């Protein structure tokens, strides 16, 4: 993560690869609740300690102890369970529009399907159904009787940024309707791990609403060619959210994502 000067978020665009000026106007939202999980930081308290903040700073975490129904957990893999647990803990999960984002989704299930096809074995219909990228959003909406729309985003290493942008855009379109944004990611399994970066499993859930509290402004511009890509975009945002910094930025694969208060 790199700190972004506040002035650059008020109209001074970031440099593009060809030196152009292509920064978008800020889009604003308020984070009402959050929840996050990783093997190293399984609780909200662990995330606050990681960010170096106390319990009285930033938005409050959702109640992470809320149990996810067994029937729901049995249908998904380990990472999917953590993503659904984070989403389930949000009080607004039954009434919010849903936006899910992930680079590869639950790829181990997809790999299992490919292995079965390569071996000439039949593929279970349930495995195919749950391998689609919006499977978790569909499961959550059914379990919560949530009749609002849902979106699933996949954009490489810009997946977190594009997902958050989609959630903020949905909120701007319907300010009275909160948006639940869920991001989950993990390193690809073997043999595809040779083509992927190392990275611990991660699940993040954010409830976005209009107004109330300190609003966050989101902008994006083309990432300068000489700026290294962040391998931890979701963690970059969580640190910004929790440490109350006035501004921060995270270089994605194509875009430079900037946040300000």
Image: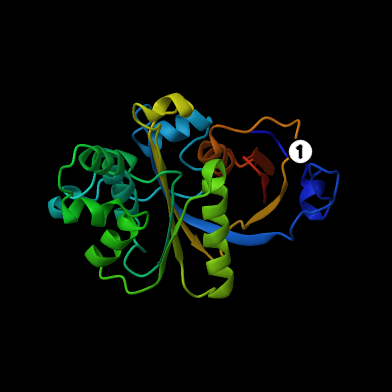
Q: Is residue 46 visible?
A: yes
| Res. 168 image quadrant | bottom right
| Res. 212 image quadrant | bottom right
Within 10 angstroms of label 1, few (less than 14), some, or many (20 or more) residues?
some
258 or 123: which is nearer to us?
A: 123
In this figure, which colouring scheme has been used for the structure?
A: rainbow
Instruction: Say which residue appears at 51% left-offset and 41% top-offset.
Output: 234
Residue 61 pos. (x, y %) = 41, 47
- In this rendering, the answer to whether 189 lies above or below 216 is above
* In the displayed structure image, the side of residue 142 where residue 196 appears, left or right: right
Q: Is residue 58 visible?
A: no
Q: Which quadrant does the N terminus fall into?
A: top right
134 or 245: which is nearer to us?
A: 134
* In the displayed structure image, the side of residue 199 where residue 6 appears, left or right: right
Residue 150 pos. (x, y %) = 40, 66
* In the displayed structure image, the side of residue 24 where residue 51 appears, left or right: left
Instruction: Say which residue appears at 20% left-offset and 40% top-offset.
Output: 116
Instruction: Say which residue appears at 34% left-offset and 61% top-offset.
Output: 91
Q: Dot 1: what SS?
A: loop
Residue 119 pos. (x, y %) = 19, 37
Residue 21 pos. (x, y %) = 84, 52
* In the displayed structure image, the side of residue 233 where residue 28 appears, left or right: right
Task: From the image, tell me which residue sits under label 1.
Answer: 224
Instruction: Say which residue appears at 46% left-offset and 35% top-offset.
Output: 48
- In this rendering, the answer to whether 70 lies above or below 44 is below
The total of numbered circles placed on residues is 1
| Res. 77 image quadrant | top left
């Amino acid at each position: 993560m790199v700190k972004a000067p506040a002035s650059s978020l008020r109209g001074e665009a970031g440099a593009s690869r060809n030196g152009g000026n292509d920064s978008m106007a800020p889009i604003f939202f308020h984070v009402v609740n959050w929840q996050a999980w990783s093997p190293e930081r399984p609780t909200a308290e662990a995330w606050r300690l990681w960010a170096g903040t106390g319990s009285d700073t930033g938005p409050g975490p959702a109640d992470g102890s809320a149990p996810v129904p067994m029937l729901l957990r049995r249908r998904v893999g380990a990472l999917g369970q953590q993503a659904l647990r984070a989403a389930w803990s949000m009080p607004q999960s039954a009434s919010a529009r849903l936006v899910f984002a992930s680079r590869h989704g639950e790829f181990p299930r997809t790999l299992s399907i490919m292995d079965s096809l390569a071996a000439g074995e039949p593929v279970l219909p349930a495995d195919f159904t749950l391998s689609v990228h919006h499977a978790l959003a569909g499961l959550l909406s059914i379990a919560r009787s949530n009749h609002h729309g849902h979106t699933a985003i996949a954009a490489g290493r810009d997946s977190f940024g594009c997902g958050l942008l989609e959630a903020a855009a949905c909120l701007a379109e319907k300010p009275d309707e909160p948006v639940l944004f869920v991001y989950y990611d993990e390193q690809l399994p073997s043999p595809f791990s040779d083509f992927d970066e190392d990275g611990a499993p991660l699940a993040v859930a954010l409830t976005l609403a209009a107004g109330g509290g300190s609003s966050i402004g989101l902008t994006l511009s083309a990432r300068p060619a000489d700026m290294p890509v962040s391998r931890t975009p979701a963690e970059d945002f969580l640190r910004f959210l929790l440490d109350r910094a006035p501004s921060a930025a995270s270089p994605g694969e194509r875009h430079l994502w900037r946040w300000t208060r």
